[in-house]
Amino acid sequence: MQSEHNRPRWDPRVELGLPEPLGAVIDGEWSGTDAAETLCVRDPADLREIAVVAEGDADQVDGAVRSAEKAYRGAWRAADATTRGRILTALADTIRSHAETLARLETVDTGKPLSQARSDVETSARYFEYYAGVADKILGDTLPQPAGSFAYTVREPYGVVAHVTPWNSPLSQMCRGLAPSLAAGNTVVVKPSEVTPLSSLVAARLFAAAGLPLGVCNVVPGRGPTTGAALVAHPLVRHVSFTGSVATGREILRSAAAGIVPCNLELGGKSPTLVFPDADLDAAARAGAMAVVRNSGQSCFATTRLIVHRSIHDAFVERVRAHVGRLSVGHGLDDPDLGPLASAEQLDKVVGYLDAAREEGARVAIGGSRPGGAPAGYFLEPTVLVDVANGMRVAREEIFGPVQSVLSFDTEDEAVAMANDSDYGLAAGVFTGSLSVAHRVAARLEAGQVQVNKYPAGGVDTPFGGYKKSGIGREKGLEALLHYTQLKTVIIELS
Ligand code: NAD
């Protein structure tokens, strides 16, 4: 546990000159700062207040959506695809030129170590860079027709797209959906998590200053059941992109069903990694440790079921223990390996899973407690559980904390069956020295993404999304553009 005393306080209100309370960002300006309800935002590492945010009410949401609708019919429609691409490039540039500030903001808001926050900021810039390059390459088809007739398709934007995002990587989650939405010609209203609203608000101001036409990206902070629900149900919202839990995803679908509005849902995961006897055990063990490092395990695609061949089980567990034993925990600004969890609620939930695991017969190989000498923050030791069976709660439910579980298998069929015996299907890993095992198992795994011999792998260009309860639709890559456009077919009688 690193000391907080060596570190000068980094207060976003002072560093960025932020108003108090922070309101929504509509038409590039702060708005609604006189709202009746406010939310206190705290640094989860030391519980110091870092901002007060005004909660967006239904009027605020309506104002944000109407502004986005006006921009959609006005400035953004007038911007041709090449112009949109150039503006997206400018947004990538502005993120990079404010990278250190955005990273520090993300660190004090989410608790994540500075290096991870810097990497998230760079990923955010990459989303704009990537989709800037495809804005003028969103193509249609010509369709073979009988003589005298001509037909073609065009992909058109929806209009206003609502983005509702979670608290683990707020800036990169926002940019992941924002960049393809804007490239395709939509405008957006973002509702960031009430736990971590700061980087989304600050980024919206930076985007307006960098030349994004006013109203194209508005951000309204607030709680889910109030601000979020009002946004998703707004009659001018034509598409919803949601990242978060399965329970909220269900609510979003219900609301969208009333308005017949299409949805992208990026939900939770319980991603397995299969480790075969011929695998590079160190690489697999590193992947197992990374699952608890990234965002302190608060990552949807974290591989949290290591399904290991019985013949290498003990040697493998030793390697994972060694990796995890070297990890440091501390305040994100000191850049340790792990920061705190994002909230008291999340810490309680994860501790509850550890209790359940012990009761069900799992054994703690390392970790399992709150670190000694921890200050007030929501810290938990990185933990590895062994003797885990696939029926236990820790193997079935998403923990979203620094907890790794090791299970064992005897045959390939058994390994695949265990991996697929889950409500989730977001991602899966395979570690093997055999190309045929890799391809055969990848084909049999029920997951939206399979990562072989490296985990995590992939970037902004590799489509991402879930099978089963992990979601509907895909983000990232060219695939995302299919979700942020609708197809029009034009048939012309030539005679
Ligand atoms: P959450 O579902 O509690 O909240 C997500 C967002 O939804 C927040 O902004 C919240 O305010 C809002 N919300 C809550 N109720 C709402 C309602 N009734 N109407 C509209 N909006 C509402 O999720 P969380 O706890 O913030 O995030 C953790 C979850 O997110 C985990 O399950 C994790 O796996 C998932 N996640 C998925 C991905 C992915 O890409 N698949 C990425 C990150 C996180």
Image (cartoon, helix red, strand yellow):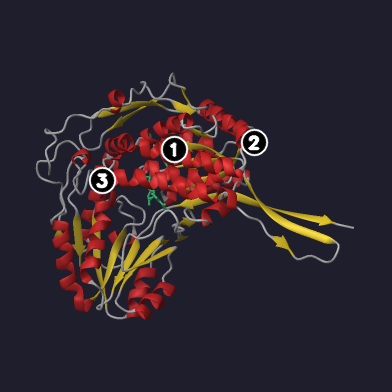
Badge nearest the viewer, 3 or 1? 3
Looking at the image, which residue is at 24% across and 56% down?
403
The quadrant of the rendering that contains the C terminus is bottom right
**Quadrant of res 84:** top right
Give the secondary structure at mark 1.
Answer: helix
**Residue 195 seen by the camera:** no
Q: Is mark 1 within 8 Å of ligand 1?
A: yes
Q: CA distance from mark 1 to mark 2?
A: 33 Å
- Does residue 493 lie above or below 244 as drawn? below
Q: CA distance from mark 3 to mark 1?
A: 29 Å
Hey, which residue is sitting farthest top in the picture?
34
* First in sequence: mark 3 vs mark 1: 3
Q: Would you name the residue on which mark 3 appears?
A: 115
Q: Which mark is residue 224?
A: 1
Q: Which mark is residue 78?
A: 2
Q: Which mark is residue 94?
A: none
Residue 50: x, y in percent?
28, 28
- Does residue 191 lie above or below 419 as drawn? above
Q: Is residue 233 left or right of residue 146?
A: left
Q: Is residue 333 left or right of residue 436?
A: left
Q: Is residue 410 left or right of residue 458?
A: left
Badge 3 amino acid? Ser
**Quadrant in which ligand 1 is drawn:** top left
